[in-house]
Amino acid sequence: MAEMWRSPQMVPRFVGFLSSFLQRVAETNDAIWIHGGGGVPPCHQKVTVFHGLSKPGITVASYLERIFTYANCSPSCYVVAYIYLDRFSRRQPLVAVTSLTVHRLLITSVMVAAKFMDDVCYNNAFFAKVGGVSTLEMNFLERDFLFGLGFRLNVTPSVFGSYCAHLKERCCSSFPLLPSTASSLTRSPHLLPPSPLLPATSIRPSSPSDIISPRL
């Protein structure tokens, strides 16, 4: 499925689709996990390092566009990040993708995918600046994400191909690319603008280094 990425419009289309999809998932889960519409008892709602205290001011679309612009990941990283999110959700059903978790899950999944897939990638400190969190928090997000995945990072060609086929169909049928989207999603070699800081997380790192307060 490598030909999927040969079109200059395919990656922006997928980025747009992924942000739209995650936004819908977060809104649906908000009604169940945050507002109690699904009748989920509070005691069953697991609070993790991925949970912010409040909904971030930046939209999922703008957040993923920022990641795409400055992280300079290979196109395949976004598919692998999607696969990791799918695996994480299946293994950690009590850590739902909501408006309180989606941003941290997104930046972490892309960073882990870039480290696993790309020969050269930015370090945690850079991804922290992109994502609007402290380097310390980025380290703990990565750790908990890896444990949540059971360290299952390998993606076979057949699995990658099946996800690509599914995503290509979904992207082309339900998320047509607008000209404005294609022009706005471009990579930048310049210095990062000020980070859109995420609200503080409700969980502090459980290690001796947790005495260092996050910058958020």
Image (cartoon, rainbow, N blue to C red):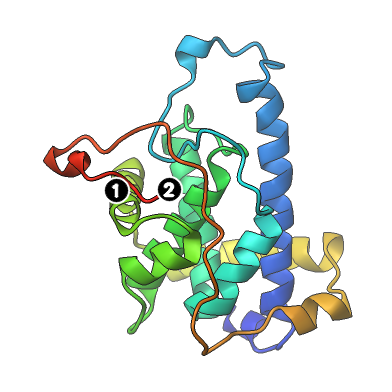
- In front of the other: label 1 or label 2? 2
Q: Where is residue 137 drawn, in percent x and y?
A: 33, 50
Q: Where is residue 146 drawn, in percent x and y?
A: 31, 50
Q: Residue at x 52, y 88 (%)?
A: 190
Q: Is residue 179 left or right of residue 187?
A: right
Q: CA distance from mark 1 to mark 2?
A: 14 Å
Q: Quadrant of residue 153?
A: bottom left
Q: Quadrant of residue 6?
A: bottom right
Q: Which residue is mark 2?
A: 216
Q: Where is residue 185 drawn, in percent x and y?
A: 70, 78
Q: Quadrant of residue 67?
A: bottom right
Q: Residue at x 53, y 41 (%)?
A: 101
Q: Which residue is mark 1?
A: 140
For label 1, count other residues whose C-alpha is less than 10 Å away and answer few (under 14), some (14-19) or many (20+). some
Q: Across the whole image, how many numbered discs are drawn on residues?
A: 2
Amino acid carrying mark 2 in the image: Leu
For label 2, count other residues whose C-alpha is less than 10 Å away and answer few (under 14), some (14-19) or many (20+). few
Q: Where is residue 134 drawn, in percent x and y?
A: 36, 56
Say which of 197 and 206 sits in front: 197
1 or 2: tag closer to the N-terminus? 1
Can residue 155 be seen by looking at this rendering?
no
